[in-house]
Image: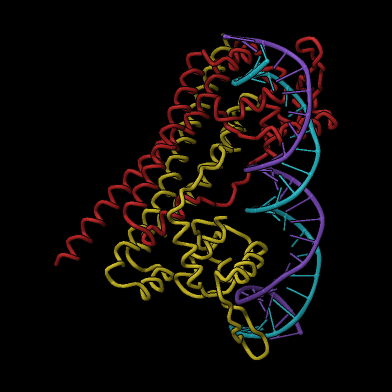
Chain colours: A yellow, B red, C purple, D cyan
Amino acid sequence: MSLRHAMLALLTAEPMTGYDIAEHFNEAVAFLWAAPHSQIYPELRRMETEGLVQAEEVLRGGRATKRRYSISDEGRAALERWMTDSEGYPAERNAHRLKAAYFELTDFSVAREHLAAHIRHYNRRLDQWRETAEAIRSRRHPLLLLRLEKAPPELHDVIVAYKALAFDGEAARARAEIEWAQRGIELVDELEAKQKVNTQA
Amino acid sequence: MSLRHAMLALLTAEPMTGYDIAEHFNEAVAFLWAAPHSQIYPELRRMETEGLVQAEEVLRGGRATKRRYSISDEGRAALERWMTDSEGYPAERNAHRLKAAYFELTDFSVAREHLAAHIRHYNRRLDQWRETAEAIRSRRHPLLLLRLEKAPPELHDVIVAYKALAFDGEAARARAEIEWAQRGIELVDELEAKQKVNTQA
DNA sequence: GTAGTCATGTAAGAGGTTACATGATTAG
DNA sequence: CTAATCATGTAACCTCTTACATGACTAC
């Protein structure tokens, strides 16, 4: 049920089309939730029939129109209810860690390459998240600015601080993954060195 | 497709029933993959028809039987293929982080309680993972001992090291989450203090 | 005109959750 | 005998992924 709350939360910044939401949800903008457009459009329709959002047909060019969605009072209430609900934790399911646990089934070089890919992946993520946190703290982040325009000034610091906190969390996770994979590579090196000594002896 | 590889990996230690696998996959034993029995039993049947595992009917008590599954050579080959495949990374989807990003929509006390729950959750996980890593390194972990019995002695150190590495990774992640939530609580305290000063002025 | 972007959908299928359902075995 | 554990299933439902599909608009 988080998809709809992620969308409602986005819509508190400004009215958007499904396309806009999809953009914010995808790698390019690196947000805290991801979803393909095939999930977004039907969900917006459902939220509309449930009264959480209102759609408005907006002209684009001469002939075509697009549907711009705004959050309704009911939607805001749903968001606030969600805020007070406690979230459960999903079951542990980490394919990369699982694979690492069985690296003995493959070559040292393959293990090393998996760990190197892990580092590359989380380095990319770390850059994105650090940049986003920085853009938020320095109040350059476009969506944040739109959000602040509508919020009372005494809330600005709080809004900025919480957004930055969230991205800091993702950055911290990325750093932990990078350090782990680096220790992993060192371990693979040691194990390989030890094996070479033993086979020579 | 990781469910079947997690099961194949487990079955390299020793033959097991679906019930045994479910136990290893659940909180009690705190493994790296989780799945309910409703997923395990049908998947074992599919893996059997595909030749990845072999079932053997074993008596239990007088009347009843249970099905004990062993990994086949084909299953081992599938596992080794999976080891060389590179894993993709799932889309980012973190409900707790998302909620934290919008804490301004609720009271400081609610925000604090969410973060405290986060700390409690990852502290429990950290204990489990640290204990498991310790049990592995000191070669007290029952499943590991069964696995070592079947493995050539020169591989023992490697097997132990990779298993411990995986649990270390989960522990590192848990530590990162705890530190993040602690910084979050400090932030909430600061924001609340600032707000009090402002409303008094 | 044509390529890239904007915009919105549908549908099949995989993977996972929750609930329903059953019955034997074992320890007290 | 009775409760807990062992053991195995099915089914409805939800979420997400991947692919298929279409068409208008904009910049060149």
Q: Can residue B75 be seen in the rendering of this structure? A: yes
Left or right of B93, for residue B106: left
User: Quadrant of the image for the N terminus of chain B?
Assistant: top right
Q: Is residue D22 above or below residue A196?
A: below
Q: Nearer the viewer, residue B99 or B167?
A: B99
List x then y, in percent, for residue A97.
56, 34
Q: Is residue A101 above or below residue A89?
A: above
List x then y, in percent, for residue D20.
81, 64
User: Quadrant of the image for the C terminus of chain B?
Assistant: bottom left
| Quarter assignment of residue A179 | top left
Query: Residue placed farthest to the bottom in the image?
Result: A62
| Quarter assignment of residue B173 | top left
Q: Nearer the viewer, residue D23 or A65?
A: A65
List x then y, in percent, for residue A117.
56, 42
Question: Which residue is drawn at the image coordinates 81% and 34% (left, top)?
Answer: B46
Left or right of A116, for residue B8: right
Q: Is residue A53 above or below residue B86?
A: below
